[in-house]
Image: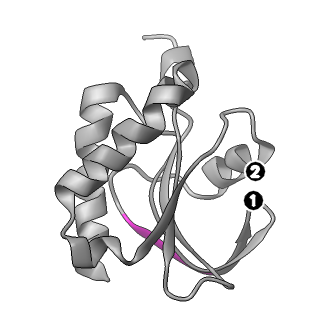
Amino acid sequence: MKELVNKFIELERKISKEKGDFALFALFLREDALDKWDLVVAAPWIESNRKTALPYITNQIQAKFKPEELTSLSRVVLVEQTNPALDAINRAVRIEHGAADVQDSNFFGLPIKHAYIITSQNPNVNAEVPAT
């Protein structure tokens, strides 16, 4: 799984350079999922055009991963920036372009057996801090 997570870290870096920062980019293994991971993402640029964001992300995934690697991915979930659970994750885990390993938690009201949080931040915070 480590190799797959590293590829997702590379993908997150590439997309964030092209489109802008993510508030959340994480792999979640739900308790009821049979070794199928959900990619859960949130970003201001997704909010500005949700209709094109999902095809863009899925195309990037398909270009990066081998077919046998894609079988471990269940779905891509776009989370709205206004979701209170997103804010809770951003406060609990602060990481960018890494891999925080979290087990046996509850995110977005779902029991999560395992998670790799690659980026969790409030992308608007840096914009709000005045320069000194």
Q: Type of residue at label 1?
A: Phe
Mark nearer the N terminus (2 vs 1): 2
Residue labelled with disc 2: 85
Q: Residue 69: x, y in percent?
A: 27, 75
Q: Neighbour class for label 1 at 10 Å: few (<14), some, many (≥20)? A: few
Q: Nearer the viewer, residue 19 or 103?
A: 19
Quadrant where the N terminus is found in the figure = bottom left
Residue 119 in view (yes/no)? yes
Residue 129 in view (yes/no)? no
Q: Residue furthest bottom?
A: 34
Q: Nearer the viewer, residue 45 or 103?
A: 45
Residue labelled with disc 1: 108
Q: Residue 32: x, y in percent?
A: 68, 85
**In this rendering, would 30 be left or right of 17?**
right
Q: Residue 19: x, y in percent?
A: 33, 27
**Magenta residues, start to end:** 99-103
* Mark carried by residue 32: none
Tell me the residue at 19%/57% (across/down).
Answer: 64
Q: Neighbour class for label 2 at 10 Å: few (<14), some, many (≥20)? A: some
Label 2 element class = helix
In the picture, residue 72 is in which quadrant? bottom left
Q: Residue 100: x, y in percent?
A: 45, 68
Q: Is residue 22 magenta?
A: no
Quadrant where the C terminus is found in the figure = top left
Q: Type of residue at label 2?
A: Ala
